[in-house]
Amino acid sequence: MKTLHHPANKRGGSYHGWLKSKHTFSFADYYDRARVGFGVLKVINDDHIEGGHGLSSHSHRNMEIVSIPLSGTLLHKDDMGNESVINSGEIQIMSAGTGVVHSESNASLEIPVKFLQVWLEPSEKNVTPRYQQVNLVKLLNRNQFNQVLSPSMHDAGVWLYQNAWFSVGEFDAGVTQTYTLNDTDNGVYVFVISGSVVIDSNVLQPRDGLGITEMDKFTMDVISKAQVLVMEVPMG
């Protein structure tokens, strides 16, 4: 097993008053040649938008864009005709394909919204843009890695144009859990949303990331009550 530890306090960031964003990987004006994605995983942005504000309409193409609200409510609008509110406990994906224009804003005038936005390169380019949003509450079993994204539209959660799987789990202190890869050619990027865990002697605190390659499974020990996002992705 090979690991690459990315401490939270070493991330890049951007601050625009109403928008605070931390970047695990190089993004916008932040560039670190040692942090240019992990395989096809290109962006993990940890965003905070104040009430009554948001990102105006902008375009994307040939990118799989996943949004996971952590608290508050996120308002999404796009030129496919979608307008929806995304809450904590839900996941959203937009396959940009040939091109899509969308906006993201805080659905509340008072309460900040905090969310993760994750970008992956697709396995197929120039597909017809699509949008999907799923409530995850019934899928989440405590102290387990729960699949919330996969390459198949028939699986639990949302699907995307890539040989990738995402899992989310909430774990109690003292729990030990093992994640087994769906494709042994993939790598895994673990992002700790809250709490503290240990993987292969790496102690991970809130918002730390750990890239793992050259293995078919890994074991995680939970130090303190934790919420963890696991992103299994192709490394090519």
Image (cartoon, grey):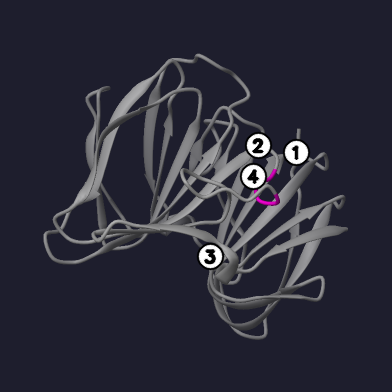
Position of 171 with respect to 203 (left or right) is left
The kind of residue on which mark 2 rests is: Val
Question: Closer to the N terminus: mark 3 or mark 1?
Answer: 3
The kind of residue on which mark 3 rests is: Asn
Q: Which mark is residue 40?
A: 2
Q: Are marks 3 and 1 in contact (CB under 8 Å)?
A: no
- What residue is pinned by disc 4? 37
Q: Which mark is residue 141?
A: 3
Question: Closer to the N terminus: mark 4 or mark 3?
Answer: 4
Instruction: Identify the secondary structure beneath mark 1.
Output: loop
Instruction: Tell me what residue is drawn at x 26 percent, y 37 percent.
Output: 103
Instruction: Identify the secondary structure beneath mark 2.
Output: loop
- Magenta segment, which residues? 34-38
How many other residues sit within 10 Å of disc 3, few (<14), some (14-19) or many (≥20)?
A: few
Please check the rendered image and state whether residue 37 is part of the magenta-colored stretch, yes or no: yes
Label 2 – label 1 distance at C-alpha: 6 Å
- What residue is pinned by disc 1? 235
Q: Are marks 1 and 4 in contact (CB under 8 Å)?
A: no
Q: Residue 99 sits in which quadrant? A: top left
Please identify, in this view, whether the residue under mark 3 or under mark 1 is nearer the observer: 1
The kind of residue on which mark 1 rests is: Met
How many other residues sit within 10 Å of disc 2, few (<14), some (14-19) or many (≥20)?
A: many
Q: Is residue 175 above or below residue 15?
A: below
Label 2 – label 3 distance at C-alpha: 28 Å
Residue 227 spot, x, y in % from top left: 53, 70
Please identify, in this view, whether the residue under mark 2 or under mark 3 is nearer the observer: 2
